[in-house]
Amino acid sequence: MKKIVLSIAGVMAVAAFAPEASALPVFARQTGMACSACHFQHFPLLNGFGRAFKEGGFTMMGAEAKVEGDNLSIPAVLNMAVLTSMGYIKTNQVADPTGVTKNYGNGTWGVPGVSGGGGDGEASLFFGGHVSDFAGFLSEVTLGGPGAALGSAKLPMLYDMGSAKIGVVPFATDGQGASYSMEVLNTGANAVHSITNTVGPNGEFINAVSAQQYIGTATNALGVGFVANSDMGLINITKFQQTGTTGGTYGSLGSTYARVLGTFDMAGWDTGVGIQNWSGASLYNPGAIGVPSVAAQPSANPAIPLTPSAMQATKAWALDGQMQGSLGGMPVGFYASYARAPGGLQNGEINTYNSGTLTRSSFNIDAELGVVPEVATIGAALRRGKSGFADAGGSNTNDNAIYLTATYKLQQNMLARLSYVKQSGSYWDQQNIGGGGTNSQVLGSQTYELNMYVLF
């Protein structure tokens, strides 16, 4: 039964890549079928079909021809795809009074290859797909900016063992963290898979919908995942260090990421629940292409600056779950996540996921309704967070958020998105560590963004 599901699932799937990215026509070309077969409502959300394709290691083939021989099975054509985006951002931070060098308070535009921040202005090239009967490949090259750079790459090698697949996933990524090795839920357990594919100039949209992203788990990572999965769920034990493809530094894989999740049908609802844990310490390097670190997170301006190429702890845990189904003939998804990262030094090392002195935590709930099935959605999320930084009285400052979004598909591979987030709590009233006013004035506690994403 599992093989049948995986064969059907070899249509077109989302795979993990940089946080701004979404679905990949690489796999549509490989399988000869439409994008919507593997997505729930819109990219980048995965349905059960898409999960099975991804857990199969990108190996399933469809219409595309193969070159086959003794111990050889490769696609006749190397598949590639392009993701580009554009948009407009406006925040309530104090605007540049000159209007010459505009900031987000003035309002900024992003065009393909030149970012205005937050998920617009991207231009990326993806290539990969079927390597053999048991192996697949995916990589991303970021275009524009100071030059092309390899942003992420992985080579899942998964072998059939009864109804399960078991194997290893060597990988490297600038900005997706250890969960890039293998993840399939839409809770933001990996930054790609959530109800928003728009990150925000300071990460405010993705931090509003996902507790894992709020505590900052989407860092550079390099390592090997040991994976076992079936239609009942996924186990992923990954050894990694905190350097990526552009960091250029090797070290011991001293950090450990563990993921266990179960997937099942509950009264007609496609359901998944899981737990994540990060432990250990490893070499930290934010890389050469400006990948956000804890220091750049809007809710975690650190009292202690992070030092490139230094050892840092990876200490955090998270719980998450999702339900996807329909109400009144309209598709609807519900998502929840909770994450905690301890503050202060961890065995003498700064915690990458929390450079404050108190516990950093977040509880996030999301919902998205397909008001016009397969065409238009509306969504909302609520965050109740603790920043990990103390107020004048020593209490952990509150960092809450309300997020609203709407999407419209002009085509299966063209998605327009309107996003709004309002952040509140005592954290935003604090003086910004970098100076120049409160966190709200410097970072902006409200953000509006309009984006268009195009994949081909």
Image (spheres, rainbow, N blue to C red):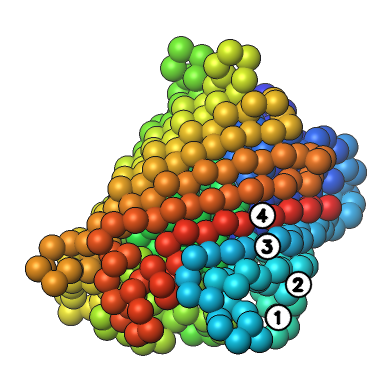
Tell me if 416 is positioned left or right of 50 in this view: right
SS at mark 2 in the image: loop
- The answer to which of marks 1 and 3 sits earlier in the sequence is 3
SS at mark 3 in the image: strand
Residue bearing the label numbered 1: 145
Give the percent coordinates (x, y) of residue 360. 25, 60
Towards the viewer: 384 or 362:
384
Amino acid type, callout 3: Tyr
| Residue 318: assigned label | none
Residue bearing the label numbered 2: 113
Q: In whole angstroms, how far apart are the C-alphas of marks 1 and 3?
A: 18 Å
Give the percent coordinates (x, y) of residue 248. 54, 85
Amino acid type, callout 2: Gly
- The answer to which of marks 3 and 2 sits earlier in the sequence is 3
Q: In whole angstroms, how far apart are the C-alphas of marks 3 and 4?
A: 5 Å
Amino acid type, callout 4: Leu
SS at mark 1 in the image: loop
Towards the viewer: 137 or 345:
345
Most distant residue in the left direction: 393
| Residue 450: assigned label | 4
Q: Residue at x 79, y 59 (%)?
A: 82
Quadrant of residue 154 within the rendered picture: bottom right
Quadrant of residue 172 within the rendered picture: bottom right
Residue bearing the label numbered 3: 88
Give the percent coordinates (x, y) of residue 281. 29, 72
Q: Are marks 2 and 1 in contact (CB under 8 Å)?
A: yes
